[in-house]
Amino acid sequence: MPSINEDVSIGNLGSLQTLPDSFTWKLTAADSILPPSSAAVKESIPVIDLSDPDVTNLLGNACKTWGAFQIANHGVSQSLLDDVESLSKTFFDMPSERKLEAASSNKGVSGYGEPRISLFFEKKMWSEGLTIADGSYRNQFLTIWPRDYTKYCGIIEEYKGEMEKLASRLLSCILGSLGVTVDDIEWAKKTEKSESKMGQSVIRLNHYPVCPEPERAMGLAAHTDSCLLTILHQSNMGGLQVFKEESGWVTVEPIPGVLVVNIGDLFHILSNGKFPSVVHRARVNRTKSRISIAYLWGGPAGEVEISPISKIVGPVGPCLYRPVTWSEYLRIKFEVFDKALDAIRVVNATN
Ligand code: OGA
Ligand code: NI
């Protein structure tokens, strides 16, 4: 048997016939990709029709119990979803060297590479991604698609615009379920003097190639998103799983045209812990590669401090988290990863 070259390029994972040791995870029975026999029919996150008259309650309940849900009738056209998906395919189908020309530098978040959370895990993940951050992606697109640059920038801009609109609509509705409005968030409200300092956004294109041993591989390891909320479009291949205390890992089956939404750390803070920042991950499979497009709606720029919404905390509290700026929170996250929320918590969990 030929020895396996451990220096595997993530741009070629789909062509490997065996799983290299550096990609082999020690997974327990609870991590199984098959549902345990005792729970043949597993529950899943709710699918919510945004045109339902009871949408506020439905969203509120989903945020409290799951921190995640799927949405139908969201107003984003199927053709736009198809366009971003095919843009992603066009990129990931390129030879590894071409993709590496768009590699992210140490400084920026933008660009091609392995998942950013890789540094917290010993084993490598079976995926590659392209991160598209406000501002810097145009130059990258020019390198990647010198001829189709304008077309692909147009698709991303349109997608970003639609996602922003949808995210704002969801935010208003979800806040409504807690009896507050966007105006109760100091930095998010628009005033006569200033525009809203609403979140900076990032789009991440993820590709999970076919895998010779999916049972022992991990597409994207368990994490929470740091942002306010994430809107995810997944191609028609499942892989996303959310973690729920009583149920374990629950697969989010793709439904054509339906988008997945999850609460991030920032919303968890704003809600004073009422909404869980859901732990999720992506598994891979043997037969079909998978693409997902994540729109991560982040926090405000600059010195703006984020803290639980005072109306939600109420006059007697307790207020669970201290104020942090978005950049400070991201710094903490990239030091302590899954302990970041604990690090800014002022009242301990048992109080
Ligand atoms: C992410 C993420 C899940 C998926 O990009 O943060 O969780 O299914 N993606 O690709
Ligand atoms: Ni995520």
Image (tube, helix red, strand yellow):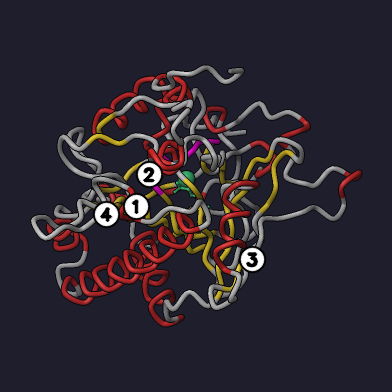
Report x, y in % for residue 41: 85, 55
Report which residue position mark 3 lands on: 47
Report which residue position mark 2 lands on: 227
User: Between marks 3 and 1, how big is the CA–CA gap?
Assistant: 21 Å
Residue at 33% x, 71% y is 162
- Sequence order check, earlier mark of 1 and 2: 2
Asked whether the viewer can see residue 76, the reply is: yes
Please provide the residue range marked out in magenta: 222-228
Residue at 25% x, 32% y is 325
Question: What's under tag 2, amino acid-wise?
Answer: Cys
In the visual, does 153 lie left or right of 166? left
User: Between marks 3 and 4, how big is the CA–CA gap?
Assistant: 28 Å
Mark 1–mark 4 contact, CB under 8 Å?
no
Q: Quadrant of residue 182?
A: bottom left
Residue at 59% x, 58% y is 69
Report x, y in % for residue 151: 21, 77
- Sequence order check, earlier mark of 1 and 4: 4
Dot 4 falls on a residue whose secondary structure is strand
Dot 3 falls on a residue whose secondary structure is strand
Q: Is residue 226 magenta?
A: yes
Q: Quadrant of the C terminus?
A: top right
User: Between marks 3 and 2, how big is the CA–CA gap?
Assistant: 22 Å
Report which residue position mark 4 lands on: 132
Is ligand 1 closer than 8 angstroms to the Cβ of mark 1? Answer: no
Question: What's under tag 1, amino acid-wise?
Answer: Trp
- Give the mark count: 4
Q: Find residue 131 and name its label.
A: none
Q: Find residue 297 and name its label.
A: 1
Question: What's under tag 4, amino acid-wise?
Answer: Ile
- Sequence order check, earlier mark of 3 and 2: 3
